[in-house]
Amino acid sequence: MVLVKEVHRQILRMSYQGEASNFVEVLEGLSRVLERDVLPLSQAIDGKGSGIDAPRKALFKAGLCQMPFPSAYRGMGFPFSIYALAMELTGYADASIAMSMGIHNTVSEGVSRFGNEIQRKTFVPDLISGGVLAAFSLTEASSGSDAKTLKTRATRSGKDYVLQGSKTFITNAGEADVYLVFASAAGGPSAFIVKKRTEGVSFGEDMPKLGMRGSRTSEVVFRDCRVDAANMVGEEGKGLEYVKQMLNSSRIVMAAICVGIAQHAYDLAIRYSVDREISGNAVSDFQITKEKIADMITEINAARHLYFAAARLKDMDSDYSSEAAQAKLFASEVSARVCDRAIQIFGGYGYTNADVHRHWRDARLLTIGEGTSEILRLLVARKELAKLR
Amino acid sequence: MNVIVCVKHAFDEFELKADESGNPKFQNAQMKMSTFDRNAVEEAVRIREARGGSTAVMTLGVADARKSLREALAMGIDRGYIITANPDDHDALTTSYFLARAIGKIGGFDLVICAEGASDTYHGQVGSMVAAWSGLPHLAYARRLELQDGQVVCEEAFEDRIEVARARLPAVVSVVSEINEARYPTLLQIMQASKKPIDEIGLDSLASTGMPQRVVEVHEIKGQTMKRKGIVFEGSSEESAVKLVDALRKEGVLKN
């Protein structure tokens, strides 16, 4: 399977001209690691619902999470847009690994952008090189991802904050060494770095999921959990702003993963449509299949260009919040639709073969996680209407 | 210890497509550094890491072949050399001649490492020919390489035996893929490789009297197709197993 395609080269040439070939080689280098250490395990990871640790380590070692960070923190200083393309390829190889690492790196970005210099130096190099795994701990049972209505409390007590409450649907929970926890303090929503071994932190059972089975998802519970005030990231009460910015960035990555998932399902389906004969004709000979192929690849490319454009705006320090929301909204729905059509092209074999339907199961999460399609539509519409006022 | 590795920018054997008659389609086919050359590069990098010195990588090819050089540079080689020539105009005899001339011209190398053969054509001739043109000893099929007191000692993996051979340096060694596990460069190393020097060497600057002419010309490359019998045994597993064993006996695969 060729992971780096002509469309990736085109996109890089359009944006980076002379530098494009270097970035192509970087993506090809990543794809060799993905082909050796990730793709061959992906089906078994889905089947067993575990086993992502070794392939995730291989990707950390290659430097996937170091890509968008400055060299002062052992990063590689790549544009975010190149990192987004790399996450697309990772999503192609294994969606649950891509999601685990993408969310992990949202925490790296949060600490890097909003933490103080000590926190940056203490955590960022270890986070981005994979020495420490992180979990983004925002969602609660009663408030979805709405940081304004958090029920988890952070009460000041001497030099500590005491956390009380619980988080749910937390990717990497239990596995992760550190948790970026959002809780309501006296001054408003605030962010705290909480280490796994802190007294008062416990985890729920790994939740059985429709897809993304390789990544661990569970509750994280805080009971009288004392966190040194030095581990508060940024300022008290600014948590909501941090969440917004981190999610903007994360939505580009999630959109990229959606495109990777869709491209994988498409590659399987188009190959099958050529190889599979029905009554003496290849499935691809039928016009109705051609319509599916055309729609699938058009939507995949549209989603790819949309997330890449959002990433380029981020690279240029322009406002990209609406574009990121549009990219994630569109790419997640495209991904589910493309994977659904792939199953249709495979027919009964698509419904019964996990290597086909797992892509649909993986994609299905992403119209929900990191902002549901409904919330993203509201965000996009709000931005549009604000332009008229 | 100064080591130079000769590599080939080869067709990616995993991505080659076949036409309707089963023959490989070379037009617009993907190219990459020959698979076994990665082990040759790895061995050179390991020697430099253990003993210091310098490493270089050399190829004969057109601009696209720089990609293979950069892959070697990303793996840790210090600098690259490209002899600019269309590889289609050369066979093993002339390729090895120009490689040997360029290696001699640059000078200062203790060890030349090649792979046992290229992963696309697998003629396996260039390494020994480079040694012959250079007047250097050649150890082939090395699955283990050690350097001791100005000598290289190799375990040579022939089909039916292992030979331990020793040669004085400078020497040429052709390695087999089991000699090591080639590393995958990090994404940063790939990016940094683009800043390492690659020197161009013009073919004319290597010409001399007594220069060989190409003696082998490949006219056509055909794919080998294997016909399978495609027999399906109907019935229960037990019945099918009996039929399968009978069929295998008939074919002479199973005796008695």
Image: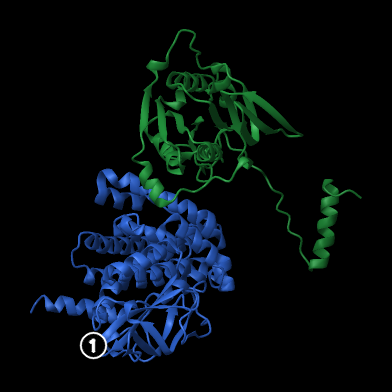
Chain colours: A blue, B green
Compared with residue A273, is residue A158 higher up or lower down, i.e. above or below?
A: below
Instruction: Give amino acid for label 1.
Output: Gly
Residue nearest the viewer, comparing B189 with A389: B189
Report the residue marked by disc 1: A187
B54 to the left or right of A155: right
x and y percentages locating residue A67 in the rendered image: 36, 57
Secondary element at tag 1: loop
Q: Quadrant of residue B22?
A: top right
x and y percentages locating residue A259 in the rendered image: 38, 64
* Residue pictured at 49% horizontal, 63% vertical: A56
The C terminus of chain A - image quarter: bottom left
For the question of whether residue A32 can be seen, the reply is yes
Residue nearest the viewer, comparing A186 with A307: A186
x and y percentages locating residue A13 in the rendered image: 28, 48
Question: Farthest right residue?
Answer: B256
Question: Farthest front residue?
Answer: A158
* Residue pictured at 35% horizontal, 34% vertical: B197
Q: Quadrant of residue B43?
A: top right
* Residue pictured at 56% horizontal, 57% vertical: A280
Chain for numbered disc 1: A
Residue nearest the viewer, comparing A35 with B248: A35
Residue nearest the viewer, comparing A299 with A185: A185
Q: Quadrant of residue A178?
A: bottom left
For the question of whether residue A288 can be seen, the reply is no
A149 to the left or right of B217: left
Question: Farthest top residue?
Answer: B209
* Residue pictured at 40% horizontal, 86% vertical: A226
